[in-house]
Image: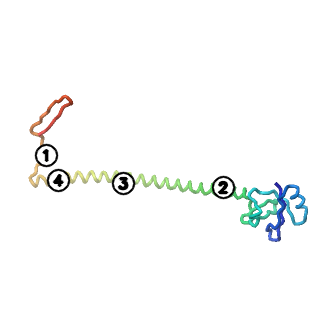
Amino acid sequence: MKISIKLDTNKNIIGINNTNDSAAENQSKIKGWLLVESDPAFSIDNKELWTVRESDNKLVHISTGLTPDEETKVSLVELTKDQLKDSLTKDQLQMALTTLTKEYIEDKANSRMVTTELTNRIAELTIKLDKVMGIDPTPTTPSEVKSVATVDGAVISAQ
């Protein structure tokens, strides 16, 4: 839909004819009025936020100099750039996490080896200490083994 707009010297909208295309075209023939394509986002209630871009006679936001569609495209481009930056950061984080995981696994393996070695040395020292104290560290076997067979299965007991 076409509308006609009147701007003051500061390019602020001071007049709007949005009744119909024909009325807007007739109004635009009067000095100071411009014929423009209406924008769905444009409203008389928020006309102070809008102006007309001279290069193509389009309604644009004063704050950006862009139409709402152009603002959306710019936002999408910026969002895409941000996502690309984020994906690089995610790749870097993933590499760092992988490195830390490898180090953790190596540390864990080293820790297990140290734990095994310490356990073996403690066992050896315990055996030596038991011998010094006169304790026989050799496990004893039961002197008598009894087994009983039952209908539901065998029961084995040791004494």
Q: Could you tell me how many numbered marks the image carries?
A: 4
**What colour-coding does the image apply?**
rainbow
123 left or right of 48 in image: left
Dot 2 or dot 3: first in sequence order is: 2
Q: Separation of disc 2 and disc 3 at Cα?
A: 45 Å
* Mark 4: few/some/many CA within 10 Å (<14, 14-19, 20+): few
Q: CA distance from mark 1 to mark 4?
A: 12 Å
Amino acid type, residue under disc 4 in the picture: Thr
Is there a contact, CB below 8 Å, between mark 1 and mark 2? no
- What crowding class fits label 3: few (fewer than 14 Cα within 10 Å), some (14-19), or many (20 or more)? few
Say above or below: 52 vs 98.
below
Which residue is denoted by mark 3 in the rendering? 107
Sequence order check: which comes first, mark 1 or mark 3? 3
Choose mark 2 or mark 3, whichever is in front.
2
Residue 28: give x, y in percent of width and height: 88, 61
Dot label at residue 138: 1
Q: Amino acid at mark 3?
A: Asp
Residue at position x 91%, y 61% from top?
A: 29
What amino acid is found at the position of numbered circle 1 in the picture? Thr
Q: Where is residue 69 shown, x and y percent of the image?
A: 72, 56
